[in-house]
Every structure is written in C-alpha cells, then in structure tokens.
C-alpha cells in the first residue's frame, strides 16, 4: 500500500510539472493569456481520473501559491490566486474532478473524453470569469469579452487534443500495466 501511495505521489508530481511547463506556452492577451494550462488539466484528468486529477491540480495551485513560478508567465504567489486570473486556477481542480468523474461513469473513449473535456473547458471559463469580473470590477459583458469569448475556439482545440492524447497515453499505460483500467489508479 505504501508503494502505491509513493507511486501516485510521484505520478501526480510529474503531472504538476507538465502543467507548469505547459503554462509557459502562451499567447498573451490583455487580462487573461491563452496558455497550455487547460490542456494539461484535460490530459491529467483524462489519464488519471477524478481523484488523482483533482489532487494533481490541488498540488499545482498549492505550489504556485507558495511562490514557485509555475503559473503562466512564470509567475507564482498567493497574489496570483487572489488576482484576476486566480479563478481559472481554482477552476482547474473542479474541472479535473468533473472530467475524471464523467469518464469513470461512462468510459475512457475519445467521444466521452471530448464531452468531458468540453464540460471542463466551460467550467474553467465560467469560474475564471466570475473571479475576473469581481476582481477587475468589470460588467458581465466586459468579463465575457475578456474572459470567455477569446478562449472558446482554442479551448475546443485543446479539449480535443487533451482527449485524443489522454486516451492514447492512458491506453498505452494500461497496456504497460502501469495504470489500472478502472478509476485511474496505478498498479502496485
């Protein structure tokens, strides 16, 4: 049992690192940049499932809140989580859980992964925009223009990539007996 916990801790840490790396791939926009973070959220949840996907995103947010520069633009600190873009980061936890939940309740197929990752994209955009609206004191229309509309098309592309890559990687990990078929847990 201890070996399994250690293995899962290492795997979650690995996905935290992937999220931090993808966060640095970005297209700057005035208030909220387009980054690879949401792609990492989808990949993590599609591969690991709800429990370990959410734990990974909690770890990512926690490390970033301590000042480690893992967020977009190599930023870190509690101020980022409490600032205009913090709602998106908090939403990663919910989105990872929901993505994994949908896949665990249906099946880990490309079709269901695309549905789950699209739902996750909506969760991230809506929760992130709510915090953006109140922190920056925007109208709902301004918040939607800044926090949702620029991200819809690229979000759907990232949802597809997370689904396709996630399902492919998950299947290979199962074939290699590194991942169990059920609930995203790793073999001991």
Image: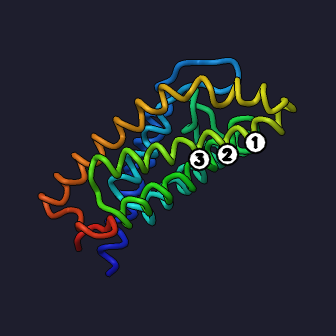
User: Are there few (<14), some (14-19), or many (20+) residues within 10 Å of tag 2?
Assistant: many
Q: Does dot 2 land on a helix, a strand or a loop? A: helix
Q: Which residue is mark 2?
A: 127
Marks 1 and 2: in contact by CB < 8 Å? yes
Question: Residue 107 sits in which quadrant?
Answer: bottom left
Q: Which residue is mark 1?
A: 131
Q: Does dot 1 land on a helix, a strand or a loop? A: helix
- Name the one closer to the observer, 27 or 188: 27
Mark 2–mark 1 Cα distance, whole angstroms, equals 7 Å
User: Are there few (<14), some (14-19), or many (20+) residues within 10 Å of tag 1?
Assistant: many
Q: Does dot 3 land on a helix, a strand or a loop? A: helix
Judged left or right of residue 47, residue 31 is: right
Judged left or right of residue 186, residue 62 is: right
The residue positioned 36% from the left and 36% from the top of the image is 160
Marks 2 and 3: in contact by CB < 8 Å? yes
| Residue 174 % position (x, y) | 18, 60
Q: Which residue is mark 3?
A: 123
| Residue 15 image label | none
| Residue 163 % position (x, y) | 33, 43
Judged left or right of residue 136, residue 65 is: left
Mark 3–mark 2 Cα distance, whole angstroms, equals 6 Å
| Residue 55 % position (x, y) | 49, 61
Q: Quadrant of the N terminus?
A: bottom left
Above or below, comparing residue 51 to residue 119 in the picture: below
């Amino acid at each position: 049992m201890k070996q399994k916990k250690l293995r899962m801790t290492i795997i979650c840490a690995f996905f935290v690192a992937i999220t931090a790396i993808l966060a640095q791939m970005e297209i700057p926009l005035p208030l909220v940049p387009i980054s690879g973070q949401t792609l990492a959220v989808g990949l993590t949840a599609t591969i690991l499932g709800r429990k370990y996907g959410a734990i990974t995103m909690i770890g990512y947010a926690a490390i970033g809140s301590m000042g480690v520069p893992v967020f977009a633009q190599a930023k870190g600190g509690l101020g980022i989580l409490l600032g205009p873009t913090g709602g998106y980061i908090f939403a990663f936890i919910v989105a990872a859980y929901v993505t994994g939940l949908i896949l665990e309740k249906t099946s880990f197929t490309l079709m269901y992964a695309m549905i789950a990752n699209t739902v996750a994209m909506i969760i991230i955009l809506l929760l992130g925009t709510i915090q953006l609206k109140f922190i920056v004191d925007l109208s709902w229309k301004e918040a939607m223009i800044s926090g949702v509309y620029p991200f819809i098309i690229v979000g759907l592309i990232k949802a597809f990539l997370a689904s396709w890559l996630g399902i492919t990687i998950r299947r290979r990990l199962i074939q290699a007996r590194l991942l169990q078929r059920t609930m995203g847990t790793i073999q001991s």
